[in-house]
Structures are given as C-alpha cells and as structure tokens.
Amino acid sequence: MILKLLVISVVLMAVITALMAIRILLKKNGHFPNTHIGGNKNMARRGIFCASTQDKIARKDRRHLLKDTL
C-alpha cells in the first residue's frame, strides 16, 4: 500500500517536472518565472523590497545620519 502510493507520487512529480521543462524548452526565450520580490516591478514601485535590499538601504541611510551628526 505505502509502496504503491510512493510510486504514484514519484511518477506524478516526474510528469509534472517534464511538462514544465517541455514548456520552457519549446517557448521562445522560455525560462522559469522570477518569483523573487526583487524581480517584481509592482512591489518595487510600492517601495517593497526583499529583506537583504531593505537592510542595505537601512545601513546606507544610517551612515548618512552618522556623518551629519559628526
């Protein structure tokens, strides 16, 4: 019973992966979609960035504040 379920799951995942690969290979300039926050133009317009970018901005702003106080 468990072995049958495992085989069905593996086959299903293989079929799904193959279909995704075929779609990407056959589509002109096909590639996996960028789901990272940094790749989303609408989020950037709203000022929403990934955590590493927000940290970089905060560090840069802090350096300017420190220079102004000295």
Image (cartoon, grey):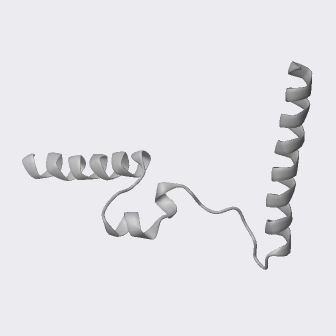
Asked whether, in this view, residue 55 is left or right of residue 35, the answer is: left
Q: Residue furthest front?
A: 1
Q: Quadrant of residue 12?
A: top right
Depth check: 48 or 27 in front?
27
Q: Quadrant of residue 55?
A: top left
9 lies above or below 47: above
> Could you tell me which residue is drawn at 23 percent across and 48 percent down?
63
Which quadrant does the N terminus fall into?
Answer: top right
Depth check: 39 or 3 in front?
3
Asked whether, in this view, residue 9 is left or right of residue 48, the answer is: right
Q: Residue furthest bottom?
A: 28
Q: Residue furthest top?
A: 2
40 lies above or below 67: below
Q: Position of residue 64 (x, y in %)?
A: 20, 53
Q: Position of residue 49 (x, y in %)?
A: 39, 55
The mark total stands at 0
Asked whether, in this view, residue 22 is left or right of residue 40, the answer is: right
Q: Position of residue 50 (x, y in %)?
A: 42, 51
> Could you tell me which residue is drawn at 70 percent across and 62 percent down?
32
Q: Position of residue 46 (x, y in %)?
A: 31, 65
> Could you tell me which residue is drawn at 8 percent across and 47 percent down?
69
> Could you tell me which residue is drawn at 35 percent across and 50 percent down?
54
1 lies above or below 18: above
